[in-house]
């Protein structure tokens, strides 16, 4: 799992501007990856200046499931739904920028695990693209392009080279390119990832001051009450009180589900 060898065989990333490079391998159809999202967001809010985040796909699909897309100029010819479609869609969204890819993935996980929508359906994926304000025509073209398939294959190759067997998995690299990466498979408490970052950097981590709630909603499309409470280190009751103030001011809107409440910035 030497990064120097990996870089020689994959698309070269931009030079490191932060001391740690963090690869997070996810499977869009894995429920643990939905649970991972709040943890990853808090890491970004508190310690973004310490690491460069790279989301990569490690799907549970056997290779033959990609034949559908590989053997057709238009992947949608395989039918209205296919298990490979969510992974292909994430890569298509990333072609509109890293942040666009994050927004799409977040909304897709919400559709899958809160709304119980079938995210293997191309129609549903287009709806998600509309919801997160992607260029839908561009998304549709990219979805069926060979470039997106190659991008997905690069992720799968990286997973193989880093010996990532399942998702979610974190792989941490430090500035010394010859060093092996530190792989953490599965989902652990937030403090575990803090400790790993601190040990790799070799100094005490100093968390950033959280942004205002308004800025937080500009960065992340939807946030749960508990997630907001964790980011600001306050009780859920206090977080809900602040959110209800903004609800009355028509700055946010509430999206209730059976066991969780999501909040998002209200469209003007």
Image (tube, rainbow, N blue to C red):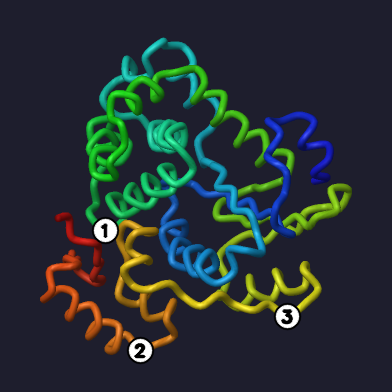
At a point 54% along the width and 68% down the height, the residue shown is 43
Is residue 240 in view from this perspective?
A: yes
What residue is pinned by disc 3?
Answer: 204
The residue under the point 49% across, 16% down is 70
Q: Is residue 54 left or right of residue 238?
A: right
The answer to whether residue 254 of the structure is visible from this angle is no
Whether residue 204 is situated above or below residue 188 in the rendered picture: below
Mark 1–mark 2 CB contact (< 8 Å): no
Give SS at disc 2.
Answer: loop
Q: Which of these two is toward me, 84 or 48?
A: 48
The answer for how far apart the CA atoms under marks 1 and 2 are is 23 Å
Give the side of residue 19 with respect to residue 130, left or right. Answer: right
Q: Quadrant of the C terminus?
A: bottom left
Q: Position of residue 216 (x, y in %)?
A: 37, 66
The front one of 240 and 183 is: 240
Observer-side mark, 1 or 3, equals 3
Q: Are marks 1 and 3 in contact (CB under 8 Å)?
A: no
Q: Which residue is mark 1?
A: 114
Seen at 80% across and 46% down, the residue is 1
From the top left corner, tell me how far across and down residue 227 is, in percent.
38, 73
The mark that comes first in sequence, 2 or 3, is 3
Q: Which residue is mark 2?
A: 235
Q: CA distance from mark 2 to mark 3?
A: 26 Å
């Amino acid at each position: 799992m030497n990064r120097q060898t990996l870089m020689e065989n994959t698309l070269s990333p931009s030079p490191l501007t932060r001391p740690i490079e963090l690869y997070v391998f996810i499977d869009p159809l894995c429920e643990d990856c939905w649970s991972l999202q709040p943890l990853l967001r808090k890491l970004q809010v508190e310690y973004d200046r310490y690491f460069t985040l790279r989301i990569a796909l490690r799907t549970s699909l056997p290779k033959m499931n990609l034949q559908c897309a590989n053997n057709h100029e238009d992947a949608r010819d395989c039918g209205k739904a296919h298990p490979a479609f969510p992974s292909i869609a994430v890569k298509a969204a990333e072609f509109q920028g890293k942040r666009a890819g994050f927004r799409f993935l977040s909304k897709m996980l919400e559709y899958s695990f809160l709304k119980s929508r079938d995210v293997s359906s191309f129609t549903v994926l287009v709806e998600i693209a509309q919801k997160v304000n992607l260029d839908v025509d561009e998304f549709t073209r990219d979805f069926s392009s060979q470039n997106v398939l190659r991008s997905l294959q690069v992720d799968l190759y990286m997973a193989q080279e880093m010996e990532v067997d399942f998702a979610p998995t974190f792989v941490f690299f430090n500035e010394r390119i010859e060093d092996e990466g530190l792989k953490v498979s599965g989902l652990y408490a937030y403090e575990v990832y803090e400790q790993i970052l601190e040990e790799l950097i070799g100094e005490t981590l100093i968390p950033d001051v959280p942004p205002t709630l308004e800025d937080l909603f500009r960065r992340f499309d939807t946030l749960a009450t508990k997630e907001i409470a964790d980011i600001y280190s306050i009780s859920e009751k206090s977080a809900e009180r602040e959110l209800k103030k903004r609800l009355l001011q028509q700055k946010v809107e509430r999206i209730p589900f059976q066991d969780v409440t999501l909040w998002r910035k209200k469209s003007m």
